[in-house]
Each structure stands twice: as C-alpha cells, then as structure tokens.
Image (cartoon, grey):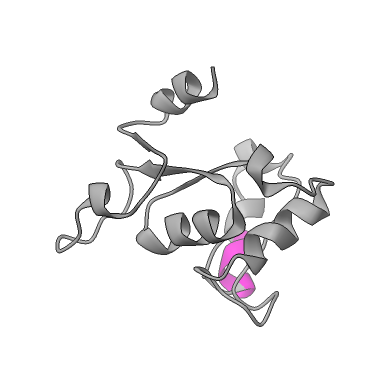
Amino acid sequence: MTNKPSFLTRPLIESIPLFSDCSVIVCSDDLPEKKPDPRPLTFALEQIGITDPSCCIYAGDHIRDIQCGNNAGAVTVAAAWGYIPQNQQISDWGADFTAEDPGCIISILS
C-alpha cells in the first residue's frame, strides 16, 4: 500500500525479484480514498481474503501509515528505520509497537 501512483509503483515492485510473490499492490490511484483513511488497507486485506483487520499487523514509516492502520483496527508498527520527518517524534504517532529495524517485527509477531 502506497500513496504513490501506480505508474511509478508497479514497475518498481515488478523489477525487484524479492517482491515477485506480492499478493496485492494498492496505489494512490486505485481508490478514491487515501491513507490515513482505512479504505486502502481494508481493500488490500479483502484482496487476500482477510475480513478482520485486527488479524493484521501493519507496519509503516510515516504517521499516515499508523493512522490508516489504527483507523482500520489493525495492529500497527512504526518503522523507525524509514522516512521520518525531522519535525515528528515517532513515539507521538500512536502505534501499538515501534520497530527499530525489520528484525524487530519478528519479535512482535511472536
């Protein structure tokens, strides 16, 4: 899920072999709603057969990601290694968890 348009996102995702098994991509022009609205997340979950967002862990590197996840009722993880505007404190985003690096998400899952 991204607020970037599909003409930029899809070619990038398709060029990275790691993402070849990606089940769903939701871009800013796929729906009229955008993050922090919960609809992009609930739409993505519907595409993979998940009807209860509380069964989802949604990680993001921007406050809009956390707001989107919270608005949808998902468990949220603030990714501290991503894009963090200098004027924001990640602890103020309201995430359920903060992950300092991708490996921290494994401990959150267990």
> Residue 17: horizontal and vertical position, in percent?
64, 39
The answer to whether residue 41 shows anywhere in this view is yes
Kindly give the residue lying farthest to the left in the view shown: 87
> Residue 43: horizontal and vertical position, in percent?
74, 62
Reply yes or no: does residue 10 show up in magenta. Answer: yes
Q: Residue at x 59, y 74 (%)?
A: 28
Kindly give the residue lying farthest to the right in the view shown: 49
> Residue 74: horizontal and vertical position, in percent?
58, 47
Q: Which residue occupies the foreground of this view, 48 or 67?
A: 67
Judge left or right: residue 96 versus residue 52: left
> Residue 33: horizontal and vertical position, in percent?
62, 78
Q: Residue at x 84, y 46 (%)?
A: 49
Q: Which residue occupies the foreground of this view, 25 or 88?
A: 88
Image quarter in which the N terminus is found: bottom right
Kindly give the residue lying farthest to the bottom in the view shown: 32
The answer to whether residue 10 shows anywhere in this view is no
Q: Which residue occupies the foreground of this view, 99 or 81?
A: 99
Task: Please identify the quarter of the rendering in which residue 6 is found.
Answer: bottom right
Reply yes or no: does residue 26 show up in magenta. Answer: no
Q: Residue at x 25, y 47 (%)?
A: 91
In the image, residue 72 above or below residue 78: below
Image quarter in which the C terminus is found: top right
Judge left or right: residue 58 versus residue 51: left
Task: Please identify the quarter of the rendering in which residue 62 is found.
Answer: bottom left
- Magenta stretch, overall SS: helix
In the image, residue 26 above or below residue 21: below
Q: Residue at x 74, y 52 (%)?
A: 45
Q: Which residues are magenta?
A: 6-11
Judge left or right: residue 109 versus residue 52: left
In the image, residue 83 above or below residue 39: above
In the image, residue 69 above or below residue 81: below
